[in-house]
Each structure stands twice: as structure tokens, then as C-alpha cells.
Image (cartoon, helix red, strand yellow):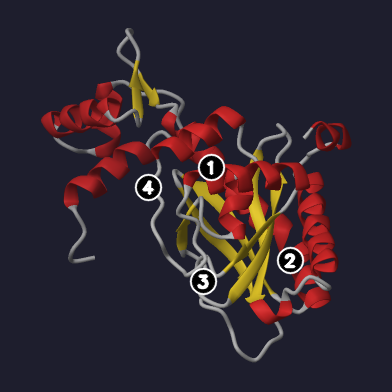
Amino acid sequence: MQNTNKTVVKSMEILRLFITREQLTLNDMIELSSMPKTSVHRMANSLADMGLLEKHPSGVYRLGLVFLEYGQLVADRLDIRRIARPFMKNLRDEVGEAVQLIIREGDEAIYVEKMEGTQPVRLYTAVGRRSPLYAGACARSILSFLPEEERLAYIDSVELGKIGIGTITDKDVLRNMIEESNRRGYTLSYSELENYTAAIGAPIFNHHGEVAAGISIAGFEAGYQKERLPYLIEQVKKAASGISKELGFTTEQIKSQ
């Protein structure tokens, strides 16, 4: 705790006052926190400027709507991980490949869950790893199923850097691949993030019909030859569909995709 920032700690003490109270005046915060009036006033204004608190014309403070946004993000992500795990395990046990779950964070995909395959040699992917949305089947399983306007805006603005020998660096090729993936319902990649590896991904949708995450299997290219692809694709799409249904995605929404 020696490196703890005292201002941050005191600000958190102010915010914690609202856990059991819907609203507080400045005097309430001073009394409950036992902090100097000037310090509480300064911190309350700063927290309000950042959207963490909301000051009403009457003078009372409430938690800002930013907490609702972040709280929903945390809840959604934790729920997806919890719901996805049994499907990921079944998929891993069925195909023997590493299984990965990702969510979107800005223009990147972040790995939030992984189950190792049954092969003795493992791929370099880990929870917390990030990749650009355009690279690899897993990340592109999110990009390919975003609203068309959002997809096109992303492609126009992104700089396509080379990561593996198979990374897509041509925007026309990327557009065509995304359109094809959107029609097929899955994504496929070879050596885009790691050389001589392959991956198959599929989107996971939430109860609003929005792409909420992506699931993929990954392994060495030798295991992803044409004769095996239909079977692997079917299993990945099956897992993604199962998770989507658990998140409230309906049959009617699936048909409209």
C-alpha cells in the first residue's frame, strides 16, 4: 500500500458513501467522511467533471451514469465467460483444439477465456492478449458481424499492419473476406497472428441481436485441411449458437442475421 495514491483513495471513500445512499449533499459527505470541507468540495467537483458523480440543481449529488455503463460492461463480460465455459469445454473435448473466447474493446479484441487443446504442443494465446479486429479468425468473428456502417468505417480508418505471414494487409481483400464471412456465418484464418497456425471463429450474439463476443478454435495448419473443415466449422458454429441462445438470442433473430 506504500505506493497508493492518497487522492485516489480519498476519492474512493467519497464514492463508497453512495453504496448505501442514493443521494448526498456536500455537507453530508463532509460529515460522513470526516474530511476537510475544502478537500470534499474539490473531490466532489472533480468526480462530477469525470461523470462519476452527478450534481443536481438542488445541490445533491448522485452516482453518475458512467457507473451504469461500466457496471453493465462488467456484468455482460462475466456472464459471457460463465455461460461460455461449458460450451467451450464441450467444443475442446469434441475437436481436440484450443478454444478461445474474445470480446471487443475499442478497435481490438481481447481474449477473456481460453481452454487448451489436447495436443502436446500449445499455441501462444493467453487470457488478456489483444489483437486488432481485422487479424485472425477469432477477432474477425466480431468485426464481420458488426453493423455494415460500423464495419466499413473501421476498415476505412484502420492501418493494416503485418503480424504473421498470412495477415491481410489489403483493404479490398479484407472487405471481401468480411462480406463472405458474414454470409457464411463463420471466419477462417491461416497464419494471420502466428505462422503455420489456423483458426475458425464464429460470432456470439446477445439478446439485442448484437454481436457480443467471438469464439474460435485454433491449432496448427495441418489439422485444418479441406476434408476436416466442414466438421470443425459445424462444431464451432454449434458452440457459438448455444452460447448465443443462453444470452437470449432468439431463433427469429438468428434467421434475420
- The residue beneath circle 4 is 159
Image height check: is 228 above or below 67?
below
Q: Marks 4 and 1, Cα distance to the nearest angstrom?
A: 27 Å
Disc 2 or 3, which lies upstream in sequence? Answer: 2
**Residue 216, image x and y in percent?**
67, 62
**Residue 224, image x and y in percent?**
72, 74
Residue at 53% across / 32% down in the picture?
A: 150
> Amino acid type of disc 2?
Met
Q: Marks 3 and 4, Cα distance to the nearest angstrom?
A: 24 Å
Q: How dense is the environment of label 3, judged by Cα within 10 Å: few (below 14), some, or many (20 and up)? A: some
Residue at 81% across / 70% down in the picture?
A: 90
Quarter of the image with the N terminus in it: bottom left
Dot 3: element = loop
**Residue 130, image x and y in percent?**
45, 60
Q: How dense is the environment of label 4, judged by Cα within 10 Å: few (below 14), some, or many (20 and up)? A: few
- The residue beneath circle 1 is 73
Q: Nearer the viewer, residue 173 or 135?
A: 173
Q: Marks 4 and 2, Cα distance to the nearest angstrom?
A: 32 Å
Dot 4: element = loop
> Amino acid type of disc 3?
Ala
Place residue 84 in its image quadrant.
Answer: bottom right
Place residue 146 in its image quadrant.
Answer: top right
- The residue beneath circle 3 is 126
Disc 3 or 1, which lies upstream in sequence? Answer: 1
Q: Which mark is residue 88?
A: 2
> Amino acid type of disc 1?
Leu
